[in-house]
Amino acid sequence: MNNNQNNTRQTLITFKDRILRDLMVRSRIGITIYILLWSIIIFSTGLYRIKPFFSWSVLALFSLIGFLRVKHQIDYRKPAPHRYRFNFNLLVFTVLSPAAIWSVLFAFSILKPIDSEFKLLMLLTTAGLCSGGTSSYIPDRRLALAYIAILLLPTATLLFFFKPEGLPILLILLSYFSYMVMVTLKGFNEYRYALSNEAKLEEKSNELERISETDGLTGAYNRRYFNKIFDIEWKRASRGGNPLTLIIIDLDFFKKVNDTYGHLAGDEVLKAVTLEFKKTFKRCTDVVVRYGGEEFAILLPGTDSQNAIRMSESLRQKIEAMQVPYEEFKIRVTISSGIASCIPSHQKPGEILHMEADAALYRAKNNGRNQTQAMVIT
């Protein structure tokens, strides 16, 4: 199997719920079509008077399946995604079972010497059902092909074996079936291509969103993302009554690093310390942000001040011991950290956490740098 086929298969697996949703939407118009067409046929030809039990029984059967399809349309989005297979199988059953019933009626109308008007109406409506079904079920090639095969091939087979004089009708049916197969395959390929393009577009969109929220140098989140996630985490912690901690970190005398070794060396230092930040604050909920320049912020949902101080001190010691290689140099830096922690509430503005963390950082720098200061907000 070549790469294109592999990509196509992966795309269809990824979008299987989307395909089911498209099938459900596209098939809505067909829910009442059998009821409508059969009603027109039996009333216009008078079949409801000639064969009342047969006419009304078939109509009741189509109505029952139509009701099941309506109920499925209402319910299919309620179950969890793991019920995809059940939903798909139920859709297939409610699509193919009325087609099978109609196929029997179509074969009966062609093979039996009955009213020519009835036969003509069955020919026209069957052709219309094939055309409409092909359009509706193109998202799943197998379903679309099975649908037209059920409608046309049983009658064609019976004509071939039991009614040689029906050769013209047989040739017409086979020609029409071949044409509908080609239309189905072409439509499916176009749908698949559109779906693949949509997947690529969504992937590009997600990548652009990620890039717009990430610092290009260090790979940490940027301030734009921090402003968004901070508001979310503040509200979440307010609802749950959980602690939220903010650490603001500044690299000590970083300008001296740039002046002594150059800005490229400074970039290497920023990348190295960011990597250490991510190793220390590695929970999926921890957010490492490059605020700008040499300033960073760490947002820790569900972490109280004591744990934050312990982790921050561990980080400070690792940074102090770290030597960043650049050319023939081994560059060493230290960090100062300000920590603010509280249990958010709707009565407190989120800015208070920023202000207190900034104030704690200011104290750490004022007291000689290379240290951690903390503030608990009550």
Image (cartoon, rainbow, N blue to C red):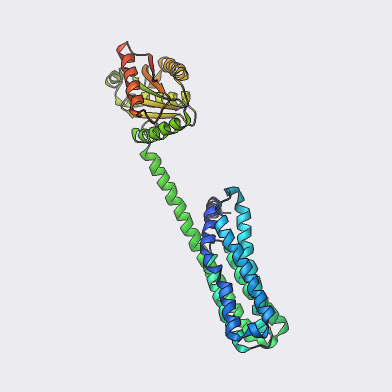
- Can you give x and y, in whole percent of width and height, for residue 356 in the image? 34, 21
Residue placed most toward the observer, 224 or 276: 224
Horizontal arrangement in the rendering, residue 343 relative to residue 77 (left or right): left
- Can you give x and y, in whole percent of width and height, for residue 35 in the image? 58, 73
Residue placed most toward the observer, 20 or 271: 20
- Can you give x and y, in whole percent of width and height, for residue 371 in the image? 38, 13
Q: Is any part of residue 216 visible from this angle? A: no
- Can you give x and y, in whole percent of width and height, for residue 103 in the image? 65, 75
Residue placed most toward the observer, 76 or 287: 76
Q: Which residue is drawn at 47% across and 51% down?
A: 199
Residue placed most toward the observer, 370 or 2: 370
The quarter of the picture where the N terminus appears is bottom right
Q: Is any part of residue 364 visible from this angle? A: yes
Q: Is 330 located above or below residue 274 in the figure?
A: above
Q: Residue at x 65, y 70 (%)?
A: 61
Q: In which quarter of the image is residue 313?
A: top left
The quarter of the picture where the C terminus appears is top left
